[in-house]
Image (cartoon, helix red, strand yellow):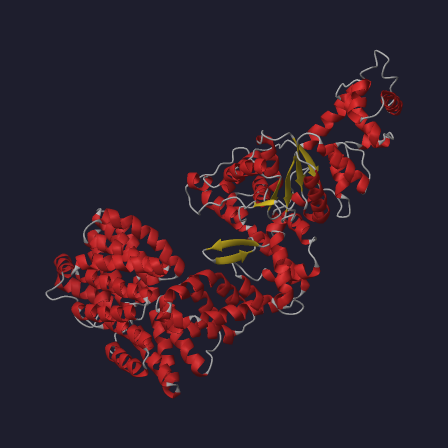
């Protein structure tokens, strides 16, 4: 019961504590003799107090009929007010928390003190009220709400008001509270303890120790640390996976909460196939935090789900205007977090702000190494870090024997704003960046074979940290640090796979000259390897730069430069025919250097460069075996993928190709390498198509196309488009086939890969022939023949023969000549 309703009215009338006891007993319709027996006083004393109550409350003698019931009516009225204030009735529906409700219903009956903990805005109060409504085995709950209590206000005063006691301060009031709770069974819901935790904890410890029938359900940001306390941490609501299926999105409670609250302010709002993905992203980015989701849903009066999603980077300006009547800290997301922040000590604030440099999970040892600098020592951090955990500002989770920590995204953004305001953000971000970028390079030995699984797990856990570190380095234009990371990994990117950010980082770095010395050689080789996914001619240019720079470098750098030359020659538009010899030299040099990792890589690229299928498969098998001996499952998987590609392209050993791909997929899965998993899947789709099973292949190509584009692997994106064109042609839809194949040619021209270009041109020529454009088909055929060092087939390919029949020998010759002389970029507009 809040002091603004009761017992302030009685206190203002001058009612004494003893008179108050008698007042409530009169309200229970006890006679004077019965009251005297309960209080162990004389009946005359009771009559004296009753007379005083009637005088103070403005009524006549209690014994005078018809005014006999005046005190009874007053007591019942105030009891009704007290009961109404004890448990506020929610005005909106309760969503989710089924598991938590089940857990808590079991716990409240068997433990006398149960504390719900969790970060601000996670819905602790709402859950406690819901539990009080459902738990019928306990007496009706009485709410003791510290939400509006000033930090210095005594816990006794709040308890006394809630229990209807005219208590003052100090030991006397505690004795009254203890006496009131000593009789019968009682259940207190003690809410919002975090800012008065010490006083509330001391009082609860005393009450629980001196009463038998008392149960307490408390809410706080952290444990109260009272003997016998059971702590139950309330997590955010489960969030949905990103997707367009409304039912799948609404299976997560956070999305249901968003939909419910959005419909309340925007009648007719529904989660549909058009907005489901946006709703899922909103819930995910808000970490399933109920307060944040409710505030976001309220904004659907103004913004669509897509517009809300786009504005979440400025969430503290967006997520305001909570419900009228709610506590101030629940009316904006920033105020909710500020409530917690203001309770921190100076050291706690410093550490909390510094923790915001971690964009994802982190472990304690890493936090100590990065954040333990003045004014925080390592010893102080040991003391302060657990206190942030206790205040639910840092979340934790255990995985096997590892404990990982993180800040919820909204909490992290709030903390980082405070860090920026303090003027110390750059030092913290530098510490974080240098640590993680250096650790990434240090993991290279394991990545290439010593303990690849552990290295891949490390990169998987810390990719967000590496991304943040590179962002800091590039913002500061510290190109040396950025190259030390990118070029320090160098050929290790073949294990980690293409990632979209890599190409963005290269674009930024290549606006500046390459570094000098050995770092410059490695930087050029790194560019050659990575750009080979997107622009083969540009990649070849960097390989040549590396070779020139390596003339006066170490034998290791010279061998790497040879590998880069051979790596990029295979796909060059202008055939050089030198890559086999260059790669053989690289294999020999790496063998002399005792570098089995790079020798295996050179063997692998050699397998992709030899001209005939049997030789290619033999070299690739040798490389796969060597990678296996090096305990490198990722590159073995990649070798098997390319072996399957060779078999599919030449329509040989297809059953073995299926076996190779099964192993490739298994290795990619166990190592957690997403790029190699995608490689295995696209080869399986191509194998289905080689077996004329277009129905199985087509949906797989559709899904993979998006994923390859996202990571920046344009070569495999073009392979997907080839497959989609083939599926459309097999279904007789040659116009759709042409659209897909024209898109593949667009990618191939930009990529500059001779092999992808030739395939794209030939397939597109076939589509043009099928749609009645033999002239255009012949031009494309001529462009394809111009890219290969020898005739495409002997005898004459079927397409060429068909075009000769349609156009005549002279017409075909003229069209082929046009194709040979037309720039590749112009072919896209045919």
Q: Is residue 301 shown left or right of residue 827?
A: right
Q: Position of residue 82 (x, y in %)?
A: 73, 29
Residue 267 found in image quarter: top right
Residue 670 found in image quarter: bottom left
Above/below status of 650 relative to 214:
below
Residue drawn where x is 36% and y is 71% of the image: 450
Depth check: give the residue in front, 298 or 637: 637
Q: Is residue 27 shown left or right of residue 139?
A: right
Depth check: give the residue in front, 360 or 15: 15
Q: Where is residue 486 in the image (x, y as percent from the top left)?
A: 44, 71
Above/below status of 355 relative to 174:
below
Residue 751 found in image quarter: bottom left
Q: Position of residue 464 (x, y in %)?
A: 49, 61
Q: Which residue lies furthest to the left in this view?
A: 795
Depth check: give the residue in front, 521 or 4: 4
Q: Which image quadrant: the C terminus? A: bottom left
Depth check: give the residue in front, 3 or 402: 402
Q: Where is residue 48 in the image (x, y as percent from the top left)?
A: 89, 22
Numbered label tally: 0
**Is residue 696 visible to the viewer in this orientation of the structure?**
yes
Q: Which image quadrant: the N terminus? A: top right
């Amino acid at each position: 019961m809040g002091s603004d309703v009761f017992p302030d009215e009685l206190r203002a009338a001058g009612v004494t504590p003893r008179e108050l006891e008698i007042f409530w007993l009169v309200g229970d319709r006890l006679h004077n003799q019965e009251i005297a027996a309960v209080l162990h006083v004389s009946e005359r004393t009771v009559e004296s107090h009753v007379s005083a109550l009637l005088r103070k409350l403005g009524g006549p003698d209690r014994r005078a009929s018809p005014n006999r019931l005046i005190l009874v009516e007053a007591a019942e009225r105030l009891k009704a007010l007290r009961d109404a204030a004890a448990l506020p009735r929610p005005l909106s529906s309760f969503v989710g928390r089924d598991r938590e409700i089940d857990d808590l219903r079991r716990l409240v009956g068997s433990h006398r003190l149960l504390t719900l903990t969790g970060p601000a805005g996670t819905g602790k109060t709402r859950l406690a009220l819901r539990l009080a409504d459902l738990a019928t085995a306990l007496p009706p709950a009485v709410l003791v709400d510290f939400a509006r209590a000033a930090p210095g206000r005594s816990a006794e005063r709040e308890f006394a008001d809630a229990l209807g006691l005219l208590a003052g301060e100090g030991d006397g009031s505690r004795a009254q509270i203890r006496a009131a709770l000593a009789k019968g069974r009682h259940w207190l819901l003690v809410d919002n303890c975090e800012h008065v935790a010490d006083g509330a904890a001391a009082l609860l410890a005393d009450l629980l120790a001196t009463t038998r029938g008392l149960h307490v359900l408390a809410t706080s940001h952290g444990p109260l640390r009272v003997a016998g306390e059971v702590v139950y941490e309330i997590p955010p609501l489960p969030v949905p996976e990103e997707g367009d299926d409304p039912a799948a999105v609404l299976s997560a409670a956070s999305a249901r909460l968003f939909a419910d609250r959005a419909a309340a302010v925007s009648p007719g709002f529904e989660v549909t196939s058009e907005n489901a993905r946006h709703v899922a992203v909103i819930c995910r980015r808000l970490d399933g935090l109920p307060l944040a989701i409710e505030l976001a849903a309220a904004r659907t009066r103004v913004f669509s789900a897509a517009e809300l999603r786009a504005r979440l980077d400025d969430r503290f300006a967006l997520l305001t205007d909570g419900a009228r009547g709610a506590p101030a800290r629940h009316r904006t997301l920033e105020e909710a977090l500020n409530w917690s922040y203001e309770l921190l000590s100076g050291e706690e604030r410093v550490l909390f702000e510094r923790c915001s440099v971690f964009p994802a999970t982190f472990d304690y040892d890493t936090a100590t190494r990065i954040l333990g600098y003045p004014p925080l020592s390592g010893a102080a951090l040991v003391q302060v870090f657990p206190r942030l955990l206790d205040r639910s500002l840092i979340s934790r989770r255990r995985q096997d024997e590892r404990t990982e920590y993180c800040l919820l995204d909204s909490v992290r953004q709030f903390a980082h704003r405070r860090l920026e305001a303090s003027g110390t953000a750059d030092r913290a971000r530098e510490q974080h960046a240098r640590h993680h970028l250096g650790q990434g390079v240090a993991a290279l030995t394991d990545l290439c074979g010593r303990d690849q699984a552990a290295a891949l797990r490390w990169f998987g856990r810390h990719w967000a940290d590496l991304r943040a570190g590179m962002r800091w380095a590039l913002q500061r234009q510290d190109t040396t640090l950025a190259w030390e990371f990118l070029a320090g990994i160098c050929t290790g990117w073949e294990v980690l796979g293409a990632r979209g950010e890599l190409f963005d980082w290269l674009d930024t770095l290549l606006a500046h000259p390459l570094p000098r010395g050995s770092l410059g050689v490695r930087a050029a080789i790194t560019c050659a390897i990575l750009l080979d996914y997107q622009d083969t001619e540009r990649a070849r240019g960097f390989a040549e730069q590396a070779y020139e720079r390596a003339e006066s470098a170490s034998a290791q750098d010279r061998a790497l430069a040879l590998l880069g030359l051979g790596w990029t020659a295979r796909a060059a538009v202008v055939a050089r025919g030198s890559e086999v010899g260059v790669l053989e030299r690289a294999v020999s040099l790496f063998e002399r250097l005792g570098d089995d990792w790079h020798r295996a890589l050179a063997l692998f690229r050699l397998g992709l460069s030899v001209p005939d299928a049997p030789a290619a498969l033999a070299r690739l098998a040798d490389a796969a075996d060597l990678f296996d001996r090096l305990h490198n499952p990722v590159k073995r998987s990649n070798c098997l993928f390319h072996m399957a590609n060779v078999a599919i392209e030449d329509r040989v050993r297809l059953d073995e190709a299926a076996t190779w791909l099964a192993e490739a997929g298994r290795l990619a899965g166990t190592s957690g390498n997403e790029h190699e998993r995608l490689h295995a899947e696209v080869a399986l789709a191509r194998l289905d198509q080689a077996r004329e099973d277009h129905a199985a292949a087509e949906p797989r190509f559709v899904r993979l196309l998006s994923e390859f584009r996202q990571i920046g692997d344009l070569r495999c994106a073009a392979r997907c488009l080839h497959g989609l064109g083939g599926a459309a042609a097999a279904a007789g839809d040659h116009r759709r086939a042409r659209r897909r194949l024209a898109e593949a040619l667009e990618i191939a021209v930009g990529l500059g890969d001779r092999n992808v270009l030739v395939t794209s041109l030939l397939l597109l020529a076939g589509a043009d022939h099928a749609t009645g454009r033999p002239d255009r088909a012949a031009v494309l055929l001529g462009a394809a023949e111009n890219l290969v060092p020898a005739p495409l087939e002997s005898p004459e390919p079927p397409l060429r023969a068909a075009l000769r029949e349609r156009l005549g020998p002279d017409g075909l010759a003229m069209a082929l000549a046009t194709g040979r002389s037309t720039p590749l970029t112009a072919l896209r507009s045919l």
